[in-house]
Amino acid sequence: MDKEIEILLVDDEADFRQVMTFWLKSKGYLVMTASDGKSAIQLIKEKRPNIVLLDLIMPVTDGIETLKKIRGFNKNLPVIIISAHVDDPKIKDATRYGISGIFYKGKAFDEWVPLLEVALKAHKRLKR
């Protein structure tokens, strides 16, 4: 795996961010975090991560609104939606803005690996 992959993890739940950050770093990824959509947009513009893991339900600016703003200035950045609810109707909205996948919080973290790898490979092909 390319050790220089930078992931932006956006989630309002501090406990989830902490555990997920630890796990992602253990897999060799560089991780930055944001607790809300506004901070995420700023980090994307300044730090240019390779991929974004974006919580769907957050206060103030939710995942859909954040995704719309990302797509306003970056159409190709891989975004994987994080959701606690398998049947959340907002997931359908998210797919309209081009997402690379969906991860449900109740699943095992090891299920992240193939999802991340597929999204990053697709992104590399787009950049060529």
Image (cartoon, grey):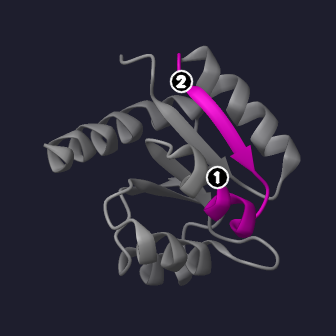
Q: Secondary structure at mark 1?
A: helix
Q: Position of residue 117 (x, y in %)?
A: 33, 33
In this view, the residue in front, 110 or 124, is 124
Please rate how many residues cluster around mark 2, counting C-alpha atoms within 10 Å: few if below 14, some from 14 to 19, many from 20.
Answer: some
Q: Position of residue 71 (x, y in %)?
A: 42, 73
In this view, the residue in front, 70 or 11, is 70
Quarter of the figure with residue 104: bottom right
Of the two numbered discs 1 and 2 in the rendering, the one whose residue sits closer to the viewer: 1
> Which quadrant of the figure contains the C terminus?
top left
Q: Which mark is residue 100?
A: none
Q: Is residue 11 above or below residue 14?
A: below
Provide the residue designation for mark 2.
29
The residue sitting at 37% across, 18% down in the picture is 2
Q: Is residue 123 above or below residue 24?
A: below
The residue sitting at 72% across, 24% down in the picture is 22
Q: Is residue 59 above or below residue 109?
A: below
Q: Check residue 40 for magenta coloring.
A: yes
Q: Position of residue 54 (x, y in %)?
A: 59, 58
Give the magenta-colored segment's residue range. 28-42
The residue sitting at 33% across, 67% down in the picture is 75
In the image, 91: left or right of 60?
A: left
Please rate how many residues cluster around mark 1, counting C-alpha atoms within 10 Å: few if below 14, some from 14 to 19, many from 20.
Answer: some
Three-letter residue code for mark 1: Leu
Of callouts 1 and 2, the N-terminal one: 2
Provide the residue designation for mark 1.
43
> Which quadrant of the figure contains the N terminus?
top left
In the image, 12: left or right of 52?
A: right
Mark 1 to mark 2 CA distance (whole Å): 17 Å
Three-letter residue code for mark 2: Tyr
In the image, 84: left or right of 97?
A: right
Q: Secondary structure at mark 2?
A: loop
**Extreme residue in the right direction:** 14
